[in-house]
């Protein structure tokens, strides 16, 4: 018998419908389309571990024919999900949560192998997904809508209206590599719970964890065809999914460039775009400098800086700048970089070598323009050292582009006004934070920053989405969050009842059911 290697080494019998074992012992995952695990005629794509470059799985190279099969499935069988009572949908998701907990270790190991996440970070991602399941189940119970009595307006006397929430229909869910289980699940869970069917595409670097989650949902009992997962490179496949006329809404999380492209090809559809970020931390002279140093370093280095809500730039008031810089370097030195499978490791590799080379180029560009390198700066394969730069010229690439790596830029400013002026420069507007103990300064900064979320005295964390988050400017459109995602994935349908024919409508004192507007056709 062939030895099970790569991700197969860690998987129990439960996941076996989702893959075949290759002759080399590597699992060859299939796609879930129309309730069945299928292969593609175009063959497979390799999935490599960024930690050591080893092959850990193969996934199908989805084709346009597979997209067509998925679209047929969602638009026929997929509708079944909206017809089952909501309480039954909740029971299915309760079961999914139990299964996810039961198979936690297998999913954690998969996240480590395919994405280079540390064990701690991968474990946190699975827990966050389980929590998201629980919280969304609670929130789904609040999908009510409104009752609107018509007699408060002259135009609608004698009528009542109901504005009810209905599922959008078919949702295309495109997810990025950095939280491949959680972000995909944060789209799929509210979509299915509120009665939509889904065609999902994971990132090519980290496709397996979503396939495992799909297997869990299948076993939990979602109706056949309500969730379809297609793997393969974005490009034509992604375009075909988002632009298909049977898709009613696109929820996309990824880079700003791809988001702008997706926005332009999808046509007239509802859209939710969670795009890139450039988190700025402002540290004022009255702040707790030790706290600020620890938090900005954690906000920068967690997940090797590959977070849309990462702290990328610190603007520190001159009076505490030296103190902060010294503590930032001390804190960053504590982070142990290494094998993500080792429980002692704090930071693993970047997702692939080209991502690590890009970060290296950003650092070199800043240094060549006069920035001071205070720590790190070196790359080895996909690994990049925790790095601290100071005095970075404002026209450096790293000051303006998304970094998506473990590099913290710390620049001095005269005062809050200067910090707020500089914070406007990057095109992004996702998250920022302010460290201060003066209420008026916190408030002034929070109101002035043109971003979706400002955190005071902590680094930004989208976490399980308990607080809503989302972008402004080049960081996207729409809001994600426990109840907010359900709002995005449903629409209001207004049903107006004319009660006059049955004599049940309210009457005006004059005896006429209508006011002086009569029937106003607009
Ligand atoms: P990406 O390169 O933009 O890819 C995102 C997803 O889009 C992947 O599944 C990708 O598939 C797919 N895709 C590529 N071309 C497509 C097309 N033409 N049509 C439809 N889909 C297409 O992003 P990434 O590198 O995976 O993720 C990192 C980015 O995501 C960062 O910019 C980060 O800030 C952002 N992000 C934002 C948030 C937020 O909440 N705002 C959260 C997490 C991440 P392939 O992998 O096959 O190309």
Image (cartoon, rainbow, N blue to C red):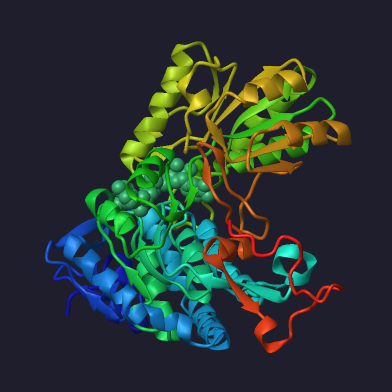
Question: What is the total number of numbered labels drawn onto the structure image?
Answer: 0
**Quadrant housing the N terminus:** bottom left
Using the image, determine if residue 275 lies above or below residue 211. Answer: above
Q: Residue at x 67, y 21 (%)?
A: 421
Using the image, determine if residue 57 lies above or below residue 499. Answer: above
Q: Nearer the viewer, residue 388 or 1?
A: 388
Q: Position of residue 238 (x, y in %)?
A: 29, 53
Q: Is residue 234 left or right of residue 139?
A: left
Q: Is residue 429 left or right of residue 206?
A: right
Residue 63 shows in the view: no
Using the image, determine if residue 335 lies above or below residue 2. Answer: above
Q: Quadrant of residue 311?
A: top right
Q: Quadrant of residue 115?
A: bottom left
Q: Position of residue 398 (x, y in %)?
A: 49, 25
Q: Position of residue 129 (x, y in %)?
A: 54, 67
**Quadrant housing the C terminus:** bottom right
Using the image, determine if residue 76 lies above or below residue 273. Answer: below
Residue 262 shows in the view: yes
Q: Is residue 512 left or right of residue 379?
A: right
Q: Position of residue 223 (x, y in %)?
A: 39, 84
Q: Nearer the viewer, residue 422 or 251?
A: 251
Q: Is residue 126 left or right of residue 258?
A: right
């Amino acid at each position: 018998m062939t030895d099970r290697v790569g991700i197969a080494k860690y998987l129990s019998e439960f996941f076996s419908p989702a893959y075949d074992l290759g002759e080399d012992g590597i699992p060859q995952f299939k796609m879930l389309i129309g309730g069945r695990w299928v292969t593609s005629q175009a063959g497979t794509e390799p999935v490599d571990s960024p930690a050591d470059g080893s092959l850990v799985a193969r996934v199908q190279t989805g084709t346009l024919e597979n997209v067509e099969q998925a679209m047929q499935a969602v638009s026929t069988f997929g509708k079944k999900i909206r017809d089952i009572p909501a309480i039954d949908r909740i029971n299915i998701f309760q079961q999914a949560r139990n299964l996810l907990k039961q198979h936690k270790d297998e999913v954690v190991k998969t996240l480590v192998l395919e994405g280079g996440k540390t064990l701690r970070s991968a474990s946190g991602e699975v827990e966050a997904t389980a929590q998201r399941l629980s919280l969304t189940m609670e929130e789904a119970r609040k999908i009510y809508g409104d009752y609107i009595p018509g007699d408060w307006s002259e135009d609608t006397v004698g009528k009542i209206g109901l504005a009810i929430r209905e599922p959008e229909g078919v949702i295309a869910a495109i997810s990025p590599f950095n939280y491949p289980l959680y972000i995909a699940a944060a789209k799929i869970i509210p979509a299915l719970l509120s009665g939509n069917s889904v065609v999902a595409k994971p990132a090519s670097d980290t496709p397996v964890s979503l396939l495992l989650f799909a297997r869990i949902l299948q076993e939990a009992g979602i109706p056949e065809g309500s969730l379809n997962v297609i793997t393969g490179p974005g490009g034509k496949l992604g375009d075909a999914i988002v632009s298909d006329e049977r898709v009613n809404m696109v929820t996309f999380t990824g880079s700003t460039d791809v988001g702008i492209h997706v926005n332009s090809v999808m046509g007239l559809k509802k859209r939710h775009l969670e795009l890139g970020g450039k988190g700025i931390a402002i540290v004022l002279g009255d702040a707790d400098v030790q706290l600020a140093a620890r938090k900005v370093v954690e906000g920068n280095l967690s997940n090797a800086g590959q977070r849309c809500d990462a702290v990328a730039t610190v603007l520190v008031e001159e009076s505490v700048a030296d103190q902060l810089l010294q503590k930032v370097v001390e804190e960053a030195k504590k982070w142990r970089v290494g094998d993500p499978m080792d429980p002692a490791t704090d930071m693993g590799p970047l997702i692939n070598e080209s991502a690590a080379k890009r970060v290296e180029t950003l650092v070199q560009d800043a240094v060549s323009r006069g920035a001071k390198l205070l720590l790190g700066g070196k790359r080895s394969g996909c690994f990049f050292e925790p790095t601290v730069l100071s005095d970075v010229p404002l026209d450096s690439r790293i000051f303006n582009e998304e970094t998506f790596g473990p590099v913290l830029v710390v620049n001095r400013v005269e005062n809050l006004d200067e910090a707020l002026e500089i914070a406007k420069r990057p095109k992004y507007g996702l998250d920022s934070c302010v460290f201060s103990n003066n209420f008026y300064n916190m408030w002034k900064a929070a109101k002035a920053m043109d971003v979706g979320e400002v955190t005071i005295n902590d680094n930004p964390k989208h976490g399980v989405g308990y607080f809503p988050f989302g972008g402004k400017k080049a960081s996207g459109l729409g809001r994600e969050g426990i109840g907010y995602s359900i709002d995005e994935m449903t629409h209001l349908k207004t049903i107006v009842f004319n009660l006059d024919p049955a004599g049940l409508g309210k009457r005006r004192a004059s005896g006429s059911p209508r006011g002086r507007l009569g029937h106003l056709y607009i």
